[in-house]
Image: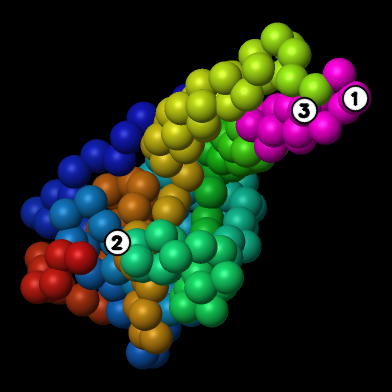
Amino acid sequence: MTGPPEPYNPYAPPLHEPGALGTGAHARVLGPLLILGNGSTLPPLCIKCGTPGDRAGGASELASRDERFLYAPAWARLLGPIVRLFVQKRSRFVLPICARCNATWRRWNAIAVLGVLSPLGMLAVSATMVASPRGTDPSSTAFMLAIPVCMLGLSAVFRLRARHVVLATRIDRDETWLRGVHADAMRAAVEAAGEATQPRWHEDAR
């Protein structure tokens, strides 16, 4: 199981050659966030545990996870799914990841899907019971009362999932703010983009 990302250490020795992300790519660090230019290619270190490809037995040991990130501001989320659909931003990265971390990511995605379906299923069953000729009975009431409990459980699931995946906390036209990237992977990305070992700290902490 993967623990929380380690703090970024700007004084650690270089992990990657400058310029490896390609011309025009850029990366910098803001606290626990890795800010990447959209479309950048990351160096061959596991995005979650920082294991280099050669240490894992060769670069082929690292999978390439094609991840699509979505982000909508808080106000859009409050206004419902239709508004969110229109204002949300998208970005896409191919993330290097070891087999263990990739399996953990997939497992938590499956748990999150089940967590979302559980309260929806209970709501559907409750609505069916209420609409039945018998009307409201204790079993349908029990299902209705269980829905808030499921929602609290779903919130806990998403909080735990955030420790094992990489999430976008902000996306704009040029950059994506990623949370959950291992400190070594952040440092390698900054170095590979050709930035100084000491990153430029972004002034906007949103």
Is residue 16 or residue 111 the one in the foreground?
111
Q: Amino acid at mark 2?
A: Leu
The relative height of residue 91 versus residue 81 in the rendered view (above or below) is: below
Q: Earlier in the sequence, mark 1 or mark 2?
A: 2
Using the image, determine if residue 14 lies above or below residue 156. below
The kind of secondary structure the magenta stretch mainly shows is helix
Displayed quadrant of residue 163: top left
Q: Nearer the viewer, mark 1 or mark 2?
A: 1
Q: Is residue 56 left or right of residue 163?
A: right
Residue that extends furthest to the top in the rendered view of this protein: 138
Residue at 76% from the left image edge and 33% from the top image edge: 127
Label 3 and label 2: CA atoms lie apart by: 49 Å
> Pointer 1: what residue?
133
Type of residue at label 1?
Pro
Choose the circle earlier in sequence order: 3 or 2.
2
Nearest to viewer (mark 3 / mark 2): 3
Q: For residue 130, which numbered disc appears in the image?
A: 3
Which stretch appears magenta?
118-134
Quarter of the image with the C terminus in it: bottom left
Q: Quadrant of residue 31?
A: bottom left
On the rendered structure, is 53 left or right of 28?
Answer: right
Element marked by disc 3: helix
Mark 1 Cα shell of 10 Å, populated few (<14), some (14-19), many (≥20)? few
Circle 2: element type: strand
**Residue at which label 2 appears:** 34
Give the Cα separation between the discs numbered 1 and 2: 57 Å
